[in-house]
Amino acid sequence: MLTQTSNHPTEAANPLMTRIANGDEQAMSLFATRYGGRLYALGCRMLGDPSIAEDALQEALIKVWRFAPSWDSKKAAAFTWSYRVMMNTCNDILRKKQRGQKLETALLTDPTYAPDDGLSKASKMAVADAVLKLPEKQKLSIVLTCWEGLSVAETADVLGVTLKSVESHLTRARKALREMLETEDDEPIRKTA
């Protein structure tokens, strides 16, 4: 079974973002301390290179500072908005450098970025490989909900789609993963999706 990560951010980011929007540098420092690690991890997974992810994080935090006044708490929680900023920053870097290292590379090369720890390394690789074959929205829905620990609503905010759309992506992704992971021997990885 795909597991969710812990240490989920809370709505505590919203008051910080309000302070950041008003130019409070201490609030920005606190925001970076609290949420920078999660944004950096997302950058590593999308870019496949920790040093480039560090650059992406710095760029994303600058954008958070600069665009905080345009953040609307009615449209997205502060941390989901910051996830979207980070994803967009990573996508910009990938486009600019025309790198072949996308989420695919990170999924296949980072053994910690895998489903349930009860699986063998080969099974984890099979699941990661199957996730790579999913259409982009399905892949991102699985990554954000199952591996990043975001709720369906938060994932919808990050991806800029409706709640029903994410639910649909997840349903189709799980079905596709089940089909891809079925083996003739009916091995345990079949049960991961």
Image: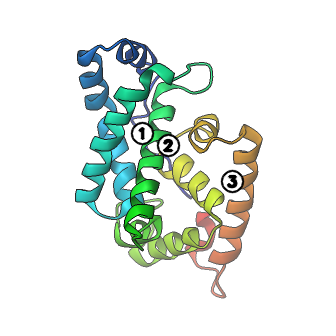
Q: Determine the image quadrant of residue 30.
A: top left
**Residue position marked by numbered label 1 in the rendering:** 6
Q: Residue at x 45, y 40 (%)?
A: 85
Q: Which secondary structure lies at badge 3?
A: helix
Marks 1 and 3 close (CB-CB < 8 Å): no
**Residue position marked by numbered label 2 in the rendering:** 149
Residue 170, disc: 3
**View extreme (front): residue:** 96
**View extreme (bottom): residue:** 184
Q: Residue at x 72, y 39 (%)?
A: 162
Callout 2 amino acid: Gly
Say whether disc 1 or disc 2 marks the residue closer to the N-terminus: 1
* 32 to the left or right of 108: left
Q: Distance between the residues labelled 2 and 3?
A: 14 Å
Q: x%, y% of residue 163?
A: 72, 38
Tell me, yes or no, if residue 113 can be seen here: no
Say whether disc 1 or disc 3 marks the residue closer to the N-terminus: 1
Q: Which residue is drawn at 53% across and 40% down?
A: 150
